């Protein structure tokens, strides 16, 4: 599904130059479950943003389902995100003045899904996640775990094949974190490609593959099924 060839991302100004990613190459198969680990500032989030078409590499090529998205315009990247990518953020990124229903509805509105179909898909997704009682609740009226489930519902409702999560358990207690990771496991079993950034080894152990990044370089890749290490 994902092929990254010698990607670098460089941020520079008049008096600085920072290589957030340094000639990274990587392949992720359709339906794979991947955890990305590394210290703060290692380039994990930059990599996730490039994979999610929120950012573009300074050099190198990124292919998503054989489309070279590294050469696409901003408008083309927006269309790719709508069709393929859903994000789950650590801080939930819910709109505070929107109800749970309205927050989940946002990606469907962006894709011009008909109102009746929107309602059917939203209610079905909320029922799957056990949050149908939150339909008219604002984020301020929800617990952290409930907010995260609404954020996941928003990610799932569009049916996009690629789920990207940046430290999704970082703001949650241990029990809520476990429940959340069980949901990511379910997404994987349902056929989604799931990529999670985490500092938590117990979270990473759920994945098929663990990628370690240090100073913008991949230092190790561990495949769970074979226990093989690369790097």
Image (cartoon, helix red, strand yellow):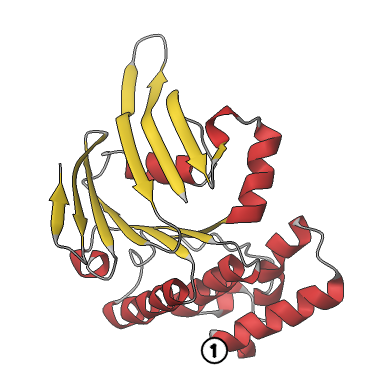
Tell me the SS state at disc 1.
loop
User: Relative to residue 122, is residue 189 drawn left or right?
Assistant: left
**Residue 105 appears at what percent x and percent y?**
71, 68
**Relative to 151, is 196 above or below?**
above
**Relative to 82, is 180 above or below?**
below
**Relative to 140, is 35 above or below?**
above
Of 88 and 225, nearer the camera is 225
Question: To which quarter of the image does residue 226 belong?
Answer: bottom left
Question: At 25% across and 64% down in the image, what residue appears?
Answer: 204
User: Relative to residue 56, is residue 60 drawn left or right?
Assistant: left
**Residue 60 appears at what percent x and percent y?**
42, 26
**Residue 161 appears at what percent x and percent y?**
55, 62
**How many labels sit on residues?**
1
Question: To which quarter of the image does residue 12 belong?
Answer: top left
**Residue 182 appears at what percent x and percent y?**
37, 80
Of 127 and 169, nearer the camera is 127
Question: At 77% across and 73% down in the image, what residue appears?
Answer: 118
**Relative to 48, is 204 above or below?**
below
Q: Using the rendered image of the protein, determine whether residue 181 is visible from the camera's viewpoint.
A: yes
- Mark 1 highlights which residue? 130
Q: Using the rendered image of the protein, determine whether residue 136 is visible from the camera's viewpoint.
A: no
Question: At 62% across and 64% down in the image, what residue appears?
Answer: 96
Other residues around mark 1 within 10 Å, as few (<14) / some (14–19) / many (≥20): few
Q: Considering the image in quadrants, where does the C terminus appear? A: top left
Question: At 46% across and 44% down in the image, what residue appears?
Answer: 51
Of 26 and 166, nearer the camera is 26
């Amino acid at each position: 599904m994902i092929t990254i060839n010698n990607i670098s991302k460089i941020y520079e100004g008049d008096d600085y130059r920072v290589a957030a990613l340094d000639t990274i190459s990587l392949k992720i198969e359709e339906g794979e479950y991947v955890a990305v680990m590394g210290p703060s500032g290692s380039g994990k989030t930059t990599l996730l943003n490039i994979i999610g078409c929120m950012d573009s590499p300074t050099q190198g090529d990124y292919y998503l389902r054989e489309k070279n998205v590294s050469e696409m315009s901003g408008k083309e990247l927006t269309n790719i995100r709508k069709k393929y990518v859903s994000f789950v953020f650590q801080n939930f990124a819910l709109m505070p003045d929107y109800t749970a229903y309205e927050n989940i509805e946002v990606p469907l509105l962006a894709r011009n899904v008909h109102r009746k179909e929107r309602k059917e898909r939203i209610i079905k997704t909320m029922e799957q996640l056990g949050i149908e009682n939150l339909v008219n609740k604002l984020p301020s009226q929800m617990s952290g775990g409930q907010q995260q489930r609404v954020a996941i519902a928003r990610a799932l409702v569009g049916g996009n094949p690629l789920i990207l999560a940046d430290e999704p358990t970082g703001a949650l207690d241990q029990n809520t974190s476990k429940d959340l990771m069980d949901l990511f496991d379910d997404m994987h079993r349902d056929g989604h490609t799931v990529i999670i950034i985490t500092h938590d080894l117990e979270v990473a152990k759920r994945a098929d593959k663990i990628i370690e990044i240090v100073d913008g370089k991949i230092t190790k890749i561990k495949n769970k099924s074979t226990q093989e290490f690369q790097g």
